[in-house]
């Protein structure tokens, strides 16, 4: 769903086989756009196309759009591959006396042309058709195809501001164009390196009811106030134009020797270990190094003890309570021992 922030409430969506197409930003759209209709605001996107898939363009306008007056309207004109396909008008009066959640919703499934049945038109449904290329085309063919391919693979919606000046009336569609119903064969040189994968062909959509037309006056010198630009490409073409990244291919191991497979496995294990080490918090790393040193010291102590066992027994010592001899409040009768010279000594080694 494409939006323009300077044109609130207006949303344009390309649907493929009835589902909203995923949109990808066109990073070079603004730079490469010729702005052939001098639109004030523009947006650029890519969508994925598929062989023989039907597509449509959906318009939505909600109450967040601010109308200048009850007689104002927006005209939405659709171009596909550079050719005008459809035009429809959304009037401000549709939003009067409706609740705040009202949304004007319109979908264009194809182009329309006159029908022999009164009050009806014939619908030509939009369909993606694969583009094939020819390498050895003559100069005249290349020139002709260059004009044809210039806007191939594009969907454009131009929005005009207008004032309703008269009543609605029914008139037959006056826009006739070639309704191609098969694939496209283009001279390779005519594409000028562009990864164009599809063009739009048409399928019979039967007859549909005729739509009313309005009498109106265009504002802004009949220039569009906004343009929504979509380029449709196959998934492979989107990869080639670097719009979406390719999924990385796994490294094949068929045909590798056992030694090469072991080497790759060892390199991968090293990468995993480095990754784990880098993700450890600093405290965990210090703890890990400290524990490693402690383990080594304990191993050395255990080895020394084993070596000494043959020479002398291990003496077990009991830990006893330590007393502060400087504390005068402690009352204790110390053991006195007579020593040589009829002198007396105090034995501090026993309880």
Image (tube, grey):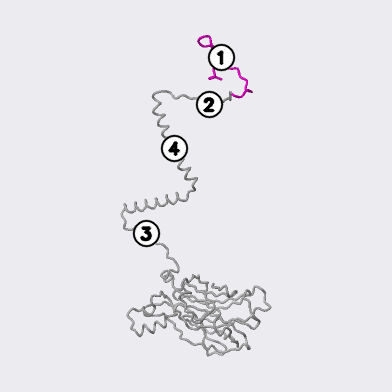
Image point (53%, 90%), residue name = 116
- In the rendered image, residue 58, in percent from the top left (x then y), is placed at 55, 76
Q: CA distance from mark 3 to mark 1?
A: 87 Å
Question: Which of the two discs, 3 and 2, sits closer to the camera?
Answer: 2
Q: Which label belongs to residue 319?
A: 2
Q: Which label belongs to residue 295?
A: 4
Q: Secondary structure at mark 4?
A: helix
Nearer-the-camera pick, 46 or 127: 46
Answer few, some or many: residues within 10 Å of disc 4's Cα (few below 14, many 20 plus, some between 14 and 19): few
Residue beneath disc 3: 251
In the displayed structure, 249 sits above or below 317; it is below
Residue beneath disc 1: 336
Which residues lie in the magenta part? Answer: 326-351
Q: Does residue 321 appear left or right of residue 263 in this picture? A: right
Q: CA distance from mark 4 to mark 1?
A: 47 Å
Q: Earlier in the sequence, mark 4 or mark 3?
A: 3
Farthest-out residue, right: 97
Q: Does residue 201 appear left or right of residue 133 in this picture? A: right
Q: Does residue 275 appear left or right of residue 18 in this picture? A: left
- In the rendered image, residue 52, in percent from the top left (x then y), is placed at 45, 76
Question: Which of the two discs, 3 and 1, sits closer to the camera?
Answer: 1
Q: CA distance from mark 4 to mark 3?
A: 40 Å
In the displayed structure, 1 sits above or below 120; it is above
């Amino acid at each position: 769903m494409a939006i323009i922030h300077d044109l609130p409430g207006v949303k344009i969506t390309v649907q493929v086989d009835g589902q909203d197409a995923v949109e990808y930003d066109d990073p070079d759209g603004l730079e490469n756009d010729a702005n052939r209709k001098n639109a004030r605001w523009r947006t650029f996107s890519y969508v994925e196309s598929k062989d023989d898939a039907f597509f449509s363009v959906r318009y939505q306008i909600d109450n967040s759009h601010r109308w200048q007056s009850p007689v104002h309207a927006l005209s939405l004109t659709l171009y596909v591959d550079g050719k005008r396909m459809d035009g429809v008008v959304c009037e401000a009066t549709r939003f009067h006396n409706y609740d705040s959640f009202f949304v004007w919703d319109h979908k264009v499934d194809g182009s329309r042309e006159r029908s022999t049945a009164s009050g009806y038109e014939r619908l030509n449904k939009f369909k993606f058709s694969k583009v094939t290329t020819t390498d050895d085309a003559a100069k005249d063919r290349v020139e002709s195809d260059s004009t044809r391919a210039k806007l191939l693979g594009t969907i454009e919606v131009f929005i005009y501001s207008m004032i309703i000046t008269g009543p609605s009336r029914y008139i037959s569609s006056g826009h006739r164009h070639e309704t191609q119903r098969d694939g496209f064969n283009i001279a390779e040189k005519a594409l000028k390196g562009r990864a164009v994968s599809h063009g739009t062909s048409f399928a019979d959509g039967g007859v549909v009811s005729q739509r009313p037309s309005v009498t109106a006056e265009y504002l802004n010198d009949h220039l569009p106030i906004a343009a929504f630009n979509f380029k449709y490409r196959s998934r492979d073409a989107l990869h080639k134009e670097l719009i979406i990244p390719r999924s990385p291919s796994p490294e094949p191991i068929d045909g590798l020797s056992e030694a090469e497979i072991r080497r790759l496995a060892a390199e991968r294990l090293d990468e995993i270990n480095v990754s784990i080490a880098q993700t450890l918090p600093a405290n965990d790393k210090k703890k890990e190094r400290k524990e490693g040193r402690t383990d080594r010291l304990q191993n050395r102590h255990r080895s020394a003890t084993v070596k000494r066992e043959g020479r002398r027994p291990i003496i077990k010592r009991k830990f006893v309570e330590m007393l502060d001899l400087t504390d005068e409040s402690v009352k204790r009768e110390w053991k006195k021992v007579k020593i040589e010279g009829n002198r007396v000594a105090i034995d501090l080694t026993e309880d």
